[in-house]
Every structure is written in C-alpha cells, then in structure tokens.
C-alpha cells in the first residue's frame, strides 16, 4: 500500500473543498477519494487496485442529517444495520430494510454506510486481483468471457461482464429512489440514472456522479407492499447468485401495478418491465399465473458458459420476492 494522507473533514463543505482537484479535472494518476465506513475502499487499497493520494474521512463530519433516518429519506452515513433495524422503514419500504439486512455479515453491516453500498466497486475476482490487467482496470480483456464466469452477468451484453454489487440499489429502484448531491451543479439524481453499464459510459467506472459530487442523502417513495429475495449458495455470508426486489400496488388480492428490479445479473440494477406488465391483473391466489408472469424475468438473458443456472433461478427469486412482499409476518417484523 502506498503512502497517503488523511483529511478529517468536519463538514461536507470542507470535504467538497478537499475534492477540488477532482472538480477541476486535474490531470493526475490518482485523485482524492472519500472514505466513510471504508469496507470496500480499504480492501482495494490493500490489493493495490486503488491508490488515492488523499483520503477524505466523512465519519468526522458532525452534520446530523447525514446519520438520520426520516420518512422518505435517510442520510448517506446511516449504516446498513441501522436501516435494517428501523421500524418505520420496515413499515413504509420493507424492501429497503430487507435488502440490506441480508447483505454481507453483521460486522460489515455495522460499519458500511448507505452511500458506500451504492458506490462500492465490482466484486469480480479478475478486477479484484492485481495480477489481471482486465478491461475495467484499463486493460484490453474481460477475462470472465473465457475464464470463470459463474457469478457474472447474464444481461447487459458486455464488454465487461461484472454484476452490480449493491443490494440496496435495486431496492431503491423499485421505490423510485434518488440521491441528494452537493459539490457540483446538481442537487438530486434519480437512482435509475446513478449507474451506467460498460457499454454506455467509461468501462473504468460504474456511476454517473460528476467529479467532486458527494452523495449526502437518499430519498425513496414509500412502498409498504414490497419484498426482497436473494438466492445464495449459502444463506449466511455470501454474494447472491441472483436476487429480486418488488413493490406491489394491490386492489384486494389483484396486482394493479408492480415494480420489479433484479440484482446480481447485470452490470447495473436491472429493471424487469416485461415482468411488471405480466404481473398486472394477476391474482395473488393464482399460482400458475404468477409463475407464468415471473418466468418472463429470464427473457433476453445471454448467459455464458458457467452461469446459465441464473436464467432458471431469476424467476424463482422474483416469485419469492412477491411472496415476501405479501407475507402476513410483515406487520410483526415491523414492531419495535
């Protein structure tokens, strides 16, 4: 790990000022980087993947709004554990609380922040291994194409076949989420526009934040009938093979509208509008109709050699997320 300096920011304005080289487009090999929980960044630095000359510590910022959970909004420094345990969030948008409750390990959830979850880097083993000069690190090859691709994308078409690593991001997509920004010309950005695929922007990055912009808060629209399902090789700490987030609008037991987004299957959170359309008008008691609608989730998938199983698992995850959204135990879970 190379030497670096640390700025203990006392305000967001101070942190934004420390990002001035990035804001001004300074032509340097490495620019200052923000650190909150640091769960991802420190790992990248240990591996020599990230070599920032300066870390700007946000945990020393004393602005209360960064750590507060309000109805429809939570601060960027709220931890995943705090989101998972918030009774109001479990009532108003259970898909958000459920998605982060099953992320990583308790130790990680106690430290990792909401904004950090959104902006973490891909977990692809070729990207994470300093011995591979892969496409995402400026090389010319996505080694997953001919290599081990069991956990890689089945949607998106490349040229880089990472899957988006955040559980929280797809949950926010089905809740019409957005992020509050400082440090640039924009003050807000819809979550659906926060990320880009490797075919639509620089393959070296995954988000659309402008240099110098800082996420300070995350907003969402309440979705009380919403659910989450992740299918893993083991249900304790493990990265999902596939997962699904749903938010339903019901008229009695009939689905009047749905928002559906998949995770761990594409380089970005992957909305499933065809499934949303197929679910409209389906009665929750009609198991066959639900299965037919969920099966649409796999349409258009282009699996690689080792990950065709994701095509079969994704409709299962969508169906289970729907069941999670309407399960009677939801009210008990939300009780403090």
Image (cartoon, rainbow, N blue to C red):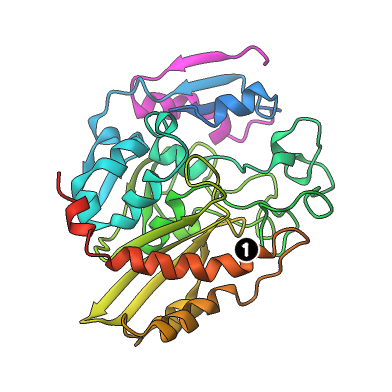
Q: Quadrant of residue 16?
A: top left
Q: Is residue 43 left or right of residue 257?
A: right
The residue positioned 75% from the left and 57% from the top of the image is: 159
Compared to residue 298, the image places residue 65 above or below, namely above
Q: Nearer the viewer, residue 318 or 128?
A: 318
Q: Is residue 31 visible?
A: no
Location of the C terminus by quadrant is: top left
Q: Is residue 217 left or right of residue 21?
A: left
Horizontal and vertical percent position of residue 310: 62, 63
Compared to residue 73, the image places residue 310 above or below, namely below
Residue 2 is one of the magenta-drawn residues:
yes
Horizontal and vertical percent position of residue 193: 49, 58
Q: Quadrant of residue 32?
A: top right
Count of marks placed on residues: 1
Q: Is residue 319 left or right of residue 96?
A: right
Location of the N terminus by quadrant is: top right
The residue positioned 37% from the left and 30% from the top of the image is: 110
Q: Which residues are magenta?
A: 1-28
Residue 32 is one of the magenta-drawn residues:
no
Residue farthest along the left direction in this orientation? 336
The residue positioned 41% from the left and 66% from the top of the image is: 320
Horizontal and vertical percent position of residue 307: 70, 60
Q: Is residue 166 visible?
A: yes
Q: Which residue is mark 1?
A: 310
Q: Is residue 69 left or right of residue 25?
A: left
């Amino acid at each position: 790990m190379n030497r670096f300096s640390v700025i203990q920011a006392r305000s967001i304005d101070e942190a934004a000022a420390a990002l001035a080289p990035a804001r001004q487009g300074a032509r340097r090999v490495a620019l200052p980087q923000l650190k909150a929980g640091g769960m991802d960044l420190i790992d990248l630095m240990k591996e020599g993947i990230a070599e920032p000359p300066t870390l700007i510590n946000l945990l020393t910022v004393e602005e209360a709004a960064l750590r507060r959970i309000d109805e429809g909004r939570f601060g960027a420094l709220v931890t995943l554990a705090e989101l998972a345990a918030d009774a109001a969030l479990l009532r108003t948008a259970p898909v958000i609380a459920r998605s982060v409750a099953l992320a990583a390990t308790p130790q990680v959830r106690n430290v990792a922040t909401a904004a950090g979850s959104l902006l973490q880097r891909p977990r692809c083993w070729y990207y994470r291994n300093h011995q591979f000069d892969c496409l995402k690190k400026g090389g010319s090859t996505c080694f997953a194409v001919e290599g081990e691709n069991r956990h890689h994308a089945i949607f998106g078409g490349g040229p880089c076949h990472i899957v988006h690593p955040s559980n929280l991001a797809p949950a926010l997509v089905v809740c019409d989420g957005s992020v509050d920004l400082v440090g640039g010309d924009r003050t807000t950005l819809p979550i659906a526009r926060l990320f880009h695929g490797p075919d639509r922007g620089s393959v070296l990055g995954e988000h659309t934040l402008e240099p110098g912009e800082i996420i300070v808060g995350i907003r969402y629209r309440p979705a009380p009938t919403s659910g989450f399902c992740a299918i893993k090789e083991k249900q304790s700490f493990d990265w999902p093979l596939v997962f699904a987030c749903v938010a339903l609008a019901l008229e009695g037991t009939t689905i009047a509208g749905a928002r559906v987004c998949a995770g761990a299957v594409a380089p970005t959170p992957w909305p499933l509008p065809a499934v949303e359309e197929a679910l409209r008008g389906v009665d929750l008691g009609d198991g066959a109709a639900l299965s037919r609608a969920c099966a649409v989730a796999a349409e258009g998938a282009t699996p690689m050699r080792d990950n065709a199983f994701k095509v079969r698992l994704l409709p299962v995850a969508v169906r289970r997320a729907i069941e999670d959204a309407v399960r009677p135990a939801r009210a008990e879970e939300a009780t403090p």
